[in-house]
Image (cartoon, rainbow, N blue to C red):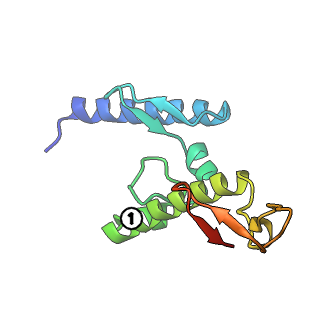
Amino acid sequence: RVSASRRDNSMTSTAAIEELHREACAKCEESYVDPDSGLTVFTAYAHLQRGSCCRSGCRHCPYREVSRTPAPLWLLVLELARLVWRQLARLLSARRPLPTAASKRSSLYTRRGDAGYTRLLTGEAQPK
């Protein structure tokens, strides 16, 4: 059983947390520091900026119906793979395109073309 003073403390703490959260969201901040634990807590604004639920059961998750059940490991791995793929696609799109077969064609010119002989490093003459 919880004592009355402890219950009042937790209610005061909850009210303080909700006030900090409201202030942080009003300033469009992504997080605030929890007064009890000193940990950084994401605001609902940060979750909305992310665009989807991370399924970690966050305190201020606007996607509550989804976030109540923990995500299976395979789903977390899939989400990580999607993030990595997006970053890789961004990096590759910023680079110049890969050369095609037509652009790889040699533009080497010789006076006699393919007729005649060529000398190897050993000094031996080979037909072209």
Point out the image quarter for the N terminus: top left
Quick one: SS at disc 1? helix
* Farthest-out residue, right: 111
When asked about the image quadrant of residue 10, the answer is: top left
Task: From the viewer's perspective, tell me whether residue 38 is left or right of residue 95.
Answer: left
Going by the numbered disc 1, the residue's amino acid type is Val
Q: Is residue 117 above or below residue 2?
A: below
Q: Percent position (x, y) of residue 108?
A: 79, 61
Q: Percent position (x, y) of residue 124?
A: 56, 62
Point out the image quarter for the C terminus: bottom right
**Residue 89 or residue 19, whichever sits in front:** 89
* Residue at 56% over, 50% down: 47
Q: Residues within 10 Å of mark 1 (few under 14, many from 20)?
A: few
When asked about the image quadrant of residue 101, the answer is: bottom right
* Residue at 61% over, 70% down: 126
Q: Percent position (x, y) of residue 2?
A: 17, 40
Disc tally is 1
* Farthest-out residue, left: 1
When asked about the image quadrant of residue 117, the answer is: bottom right
Q: Percent position (x, y) of residue 3?
A: 17, 35
Task: From the viewer's perspective, tell me whether residue 121 is left or right of residue 111.
Answer: left
* Farthest-out residue, front: 124
* Residue at 42% over, 47% down: 59
According to the picture, the residue beneath numbered tag 1 turns out to be 77
